[in-house]
Amino acid sequence: MANVERLTKRVKDLEEWTKENEMTGGPQGVLDTFIFLLNSTKHAQDQSNGAGQQLQQFRGLAFEFIEEQKLGDKWNEFIKEKDEKSKVPEEEPESEDTEGEETSKQETKE
């Protein structure tokens, strides 16, 4: 008898849960949502993999073209110029003449 009561309670809990989740289509709606999300993730991953493959193909073609046209030296010069332009200039160390600044700040406060 206790088993029947336990099972009856479980069925009632499931029915209540189903009523609460009818907006999402009930249990089948939740499952459909998860399937949609999984398929969307797989599709996005497939697109990402395809883009990566296309990038590698383009890169190979570009380097093949550079070799055939004997543009290696020009390419290296171009990269060297870009590297020089992108370097961040080193900051100069602060001068040790900060006492004069502090004195003038104190005089301004007074």
Image (tube, rainbow, N blue to C red):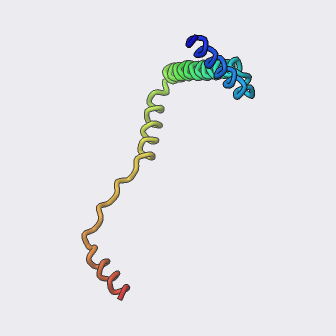
In the rendered image, the residue lying farthest to the front is 1
Question: How far across and down, in percent of the image, does residue 70 sit?
Answer: 49, 24
Q: Nearer the viewer, residue 90 or 37?
A: 37
Looking at the rendering, which quadrant does residue 86 occupy? top left
Residue 69 visible, this orientation: no
Residue drawn at 40 percent across, 50 percent down: 88
Quadrant for the N terminus in the image: top right
Q: Is residue 40 left or right of residue 68?
A: right
Q: Is residue 76 above or below residue 88?
A: above
Residue 35 visible, this orientation: yes
Q: Is residue 76 above or below residue 36?
A: below
* Count of marks overlaid on the render: 0
Question: How far across and down, in percent of the image, does residue 7 sit?
Answer: 60, 14
In the rendered image, the residue lying farthest to the bottom is 110
Residue drawn at 47 percent across, 32 percent down: 74
Q: Nearer the viewer, residue 30 or 52?
A: 30
Q: Nearer the viewer, residue 101 or 3?
A: 3
Looking at the rendering, which quadrant does residue 11 occupy? top right
Residue drawn at 68 percent across, 25 percent down: 16
Question: How far across and down, in percent of the image, does residue 71 sit?
Answer: 49, 27
Q: Nearer the viewer, residue 10 or 57?
A: 10
Quadrant for the C terminus in the image: bottom left
